[in-house]
Structure formats: C-alpha cells, structure tokens
Image: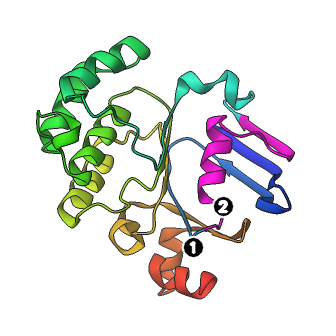
C-alpha cells in the first residue's frame, strides 16, 4: 500500500479537522478529495505530507512515518509562496538545488505546454503563477502527488491547461490526490473520489461505479454533501 490512514483524528483545539478516518491509497490512482470548506481536505493532505501529526490514529507512507518518506512525495499547497523576483529560470535553479529528482527537461516541457511566461512572478497573473507552481511540482519524479486546490481562483483557460498537464504527466505507478472545488471540470480526471463532510469520510467511491449507477461525480457531491 502506498499510503494509509488508520482511525486518524486531527484535532484543532476543540474542533476536529478529521475524525476517525480510515483510508488506503494503492499505487496508480487519481483520487479526487472533495468537500465543502472546512470539511478536512487540506488536513488530510497535510497529514499525508508529514506537515501535521495526527492527534490519534496512524498515518503511514511507503511503510513508514510520513516525515521519514517525504523524498518520495510532492506536496503543492494552496498558498502561493513564490518570491516576486523569481522567473521560471530562477525557479528551475531553485528546484535543482533542492531536489535530486527534479527533471529539467520535463520542467521545461511543462512550461511550454502550460504557456508560462518568462517574466518575473510579480508581473504574472494568478493563473500564470498557478501554472508555474504546477510545473515545478510535476517536474519532480515522485510516487505520490498531493495537490491542494491547484485550480482555486484561477481563470478557465488556466484550469484547463492545468488539468490537461496532470493527465499527461500521470504515470500508472503514481498516485495523485487532487483537492478541488471545481468538481465539474475535474471529474473526468478522477478514478476514485473521497467525499469529506465535517472531518468525516462520507463516501469513498470509484467514479466509474457512480457513473454505472447513473450518477456523475457532481451529482454524488450534491447528494452526499448537500
């Protein structure tokens, strides 16, 4: 098993970000992590990334604690932390210095396919910065990609480019967890969907099984979380 949560609770003061969640993640899936604001999506991804510790239960990544296995994963957080002086070329140098698994050829191809401009990030739109951040993330050779709201607040054309690149770069031995509110646009990408509600796992389903029942991922979202 690539990663798992076993009876995991993450508490913030008196509030549970996640409550008694058990999930297994095998290799080779694209998983949609869906829910309303405050449902626990970011908490789930941060626990797998080793950025948070569970209050109770156990998180396992590649048969060990997440913090000891982080070299094999990529986490793309929701917050844009790019330096304003940075250009795509600067980002390439930065990533090469940090990660041995950063593929320069793959990165440059992603910059082209995502139409990332060569100017400094302070002169880029939010969509352009989002596309640059995704190129930086997907250019790494990892087994688990944790993408937290990469489509949030980004224009339609940028969202389309981002989704196309995720599909194109995915390999069958890799697993991608994608948290998004743009359910209708992303649902064709998902093999599996997790619906979180108030920190609890409301539904874990195969997207194809939902379609066989005559339900789209969006319809199930409304039924389960509405």
Q: Look at the numbered disc 1 and give the secondary structure of its residue.
A: loop
In depth, the one of 119 and 110 nearer the eye is 119
Question: Looking at the image, which is closer to me, 193 or 35?
Answer: 35
Q: Residue at x 29, y 60 (%)?
A: 154
Horizontal side of 98 relative to 33 (left or right) equals left
Q: Is residue 60 visible?
A: yes
Q: Is 158 situated left or right of 184 in this image?
A: left
Q: CA distance from mark 2 to mark 1?
A: 9 Å
Q: Nearer the viewer, residue 1 or 110?
A: 110
The residue where tag 1 is placed is: 36
Q: Which residues are magenta?
A: 38-60
Residue 216 visible here: no
Crowd rating for badge 1 (residues with CA inside 10 Å; few <14, some 14–19, many 20+): some
Q: Position of residue 70 (x, y in %)?
A: 59, 26
| Residue picked out by circle 2 | 40
Question: Could you tell me residue 173's position as x and y percent?
Answer: 47, 36
Q: Is residue 59 left or right of residue 125?
A: right
In the picture shown, does residue 154 fall above or below 110?
A: below
Quarter occupied by residue 123:
top left
Q: Secondary structure at mark 2?
A: loop
Image height check: is 14 above or below 119?
Answer: below
Q: In terms of image quadrants, where is residue 151?
A: bottom left
Query: For this view, does 189 lie left or right of residue 113?
Result: right
Residue 34 at x, y percent in the picture: 54, 67
Rendered residue at 42%/71% (across/down)? 183
Query: In the picture, which quadrant includes the C terminus?
Result: bottom right
Residue found 73% across the figure and 65% down from its top: 199
How would you rate the neighbour count of disc 2 (Cα within 10 Å): few for under 14, some for 14-19, many for 20 or more? many
Q: Which mark is drawn over residue 22?
A: none
């Amino acid at each position: 098993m690539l990663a798992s949560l076993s009876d995991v609770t993450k508490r913030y003061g008196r509030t549970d970000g996640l409550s008694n969640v058990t999930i297994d993640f095998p290799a080779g899936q694209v998983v949609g992590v869906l829910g309303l604001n405050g449902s626990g999506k970011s908490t789930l991804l941060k626990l797998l990334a080793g950025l948070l510790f569970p209050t109770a239960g156990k998180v396992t990544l590649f048969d060990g604690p997440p913090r000891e296995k982080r070299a094999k994963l990529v986490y793309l957080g929701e917050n844009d932390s790019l330096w304003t002086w940075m250009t795509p070329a600067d980002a390439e140098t930065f990533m090469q210095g940090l990660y041995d698994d950063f593929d320069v050829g793959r990165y440059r191809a992603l910059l082209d396919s995502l139409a990332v401009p060569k100017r400094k990030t302070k002169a880029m739109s939010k969509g352009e910065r989002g596309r640059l951040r995704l190129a930086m993330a997907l250019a790494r050779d990892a087994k688990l990609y944790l993408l937290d709201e990469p489509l949030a607040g980004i224009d339609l054309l940028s969202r389309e480019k981002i989704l196309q690149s995720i599909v194109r770069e995915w390999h069958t031995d890799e697993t991608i967890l994608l948290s998004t509110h743009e359910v209708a646009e992303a649902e064709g990408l998902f093999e599996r969907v997790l619906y979180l509600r108030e920190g609890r796992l409301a539904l874990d389903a195969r997207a194809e099984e939902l379609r066989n029942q005559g339900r789209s991922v969006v319809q199930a979202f409304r039924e389960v979380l509405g």
